Amino acid sequence: MKSILSVFTFLFTLPVCLPVSAELMGMVPGRSAYLATEPNLSVDVGANWYTNQLQWVGSRINFKPSPRVVTYLDVSVLGATGLETDNSRLADFLGAGYGGGIMFAVPDFFVAYDVAFYATYHSSVIDEFEFDPTSSGTAGTSAVRQSLQQSQWSAAFLLSPLDPLFESGTSWYSSLGFVSTSARTKAEASSSASSVDYQQKNGVAFGLGIFKPIRNGRLFAGFEWLVDNPLVGVGASYSIR
């Protein structure tokens, strides 16, 4: 208990003015911290908006190996527009990202709330949109392959009330954690390679959302406030068993 309180104190006292990035290729939690009611196997689908430059749609497969543990895998299709590359050129990118995480129930924390801890990791290497490796550059030079390379890890606490807001089961959740993001664009030609680091950020992220149980699943929506821009996500979850 004391160790958990120490972690919370550490997170709250971090310099929250540090700009951090969104949960790249991931999804908002969209669930209760009471893991005992989670199905043994479920699938989530959703859409996420971070900035006008960065949006993605994704799916999340959830497994519950024990009543107090949930693991999940993420697969997303990410679109990025107008990102600066070598020589200040702007390029668009479209491709897949992958990741996953694990969530643990935290017992005996608050009287009126459930608490869980989760950690995630996501990464992607995405080629420039409509890149043609058979094309030639200006004056007969070789085509330049450009890629967007991203990785991110995060660790956070999830909190939700024991009692829902309404008789329909609609309730809310909040999250607080630490996020570390690294992203760059890389240009490769036959004789050279260069890269531009456009994002290397660490800091605190705060999230808030709602979810509503439906037949064989739930609907959810939420945001994560990341100092510079909010990540907004909506989705639905379907219980398989």
Image (spheres, helix red, strand yellow):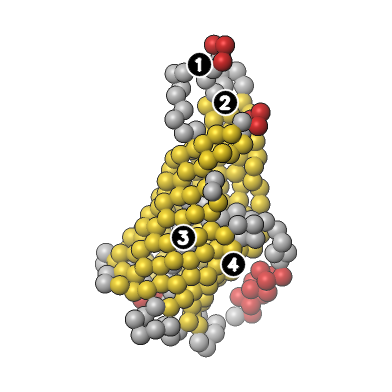
Measured in 3D between alpha carbons, the distance from the residue under mark 1 to the one under mark 2, in whole angstroms, is: 13 Å
* Amino acid identity at mark 3: Gly
Numbered label attached to residue 136: 1
Measured in 3D between alpha carbons, the distance from the residue under mark 4 to the one under mark 3, in whole angstroms, is: 14 Å
Mark 4, Cα crowd under 10 Å, few <14 / some 14-19 / many 20+, is some
Residue 106 at least partly seen: no
Residue at image location 36% in from the left, 80% down from the top: 169
The residue where tag 3 is placed is: 233
Horizontal side, residue 33 vs residue 229: left or right = left
The residue where tag 2 is placed is: 188
* Amino acid identity at mark 4: Phe
Residue 157 at least partly seen: yes
Is tag 1's residue or tag 4's residue first in the polypeptide sequence? 1
Q: Relative to residue 165, is residue 56 depicted above or below?
A: above
Q: Where residue 233 sits in the image (x, y, percent)?
A: 46, 60
Measured in 3D between alpha carbons, the distance from the residue under mark 3 to the one under mark 1, in whole angstroms, is: 40 Å
Numbered label attached to residue 8: none
